[in-house]
Amino acid sequence: MSKRARFWETVPLTKMSEEEWEALCDGCGKCCLNKIEDADTGQVYLTRVACRLLDDQSCQCGQYQIRKKLVPECIQLTPQNIETHAYWMPTTCAYRLLWQGRALPDWHPLLTGDPESVHAAGVSIRGRTVPEFEVAEDEWEDHIIEEPN
Ligand code: SF4
Ligand code: SF4
């Protein structure tokens, strides 16, 4: 099944085709950043310390096909597990937004038709990350980044 017109406005997450589901990703790369979770409050903070496979310029995984072998903790988001993971997903993530019943932002590539629009809007992490092998885990809190609400 190919993508239906403006499917994100009418088709529930669980009823999307694989192509539609994949197209929701805006390519921001933020889900590949390391996070800090406050054990007391449950609050999740995003850091600019990136997974070792993330390409800082393309914001894509450098080894997408074999990533689970190289990074076993990498999570593949699905319509079935999004409820478990939405709380730590970036606030601008299309999967999280739709799961919350919210609309896609106007810079989303599905609306602009341009994969660069996420970068032009300053939402992606292009050129902003530091590799995780350069930062000790107890220093991640020095690299927390602000997220829009
Ligand atoms: S945070 Fe969401 S939209 Fe951004 S790259 Fe990850 S899955 Fe895609
Ligand atoms: S393995 Fe790839 S997809 Fe998974 S977190 Fe790292 S860069 Fe992202």
Image (tube, grey):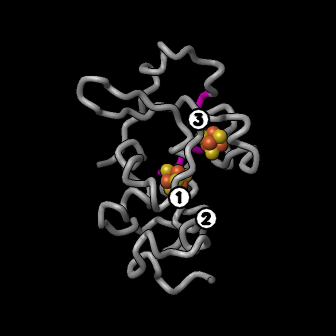
Res. 115 mark: 2
Residue 127 located left or right of residue 100: right
In this rendering, which labeled residue sits more in front, label 3 or label 1? Answer: 3
Q: CA distance from mark 2 to mark 1?
A: 7 Å
Q: Which residue is mark 1?
A: 118
Circles 3, 1 touching at the beta carbon (< 8 Å): no
Res. 73 mark: 3
* Magenta segment: 123-130
| Above or below: residue 130 compared with residue 24 | above
Residue drawn at 29 percent across, 49 percent down: 149
Percent position of residue 143, x then y: 46, 25
Circles 2, 1 touching at the beta carbon (< 8 Å): yes
Residue 2 visible? The answer is yes
| Above or below: residue 148 compared with residue 41 | below
Classify mark 1: residues with Cα within 10 Å, few (<14), some (14-19) or many (20+). Answer: many
Give the residue type at disc 1: Val
Q: Is residue 129 magenta?
A: yes
Q: CA distance from mark 3 to mark 1?
A: 26 Å
Give the residue type at disc 3: Glu
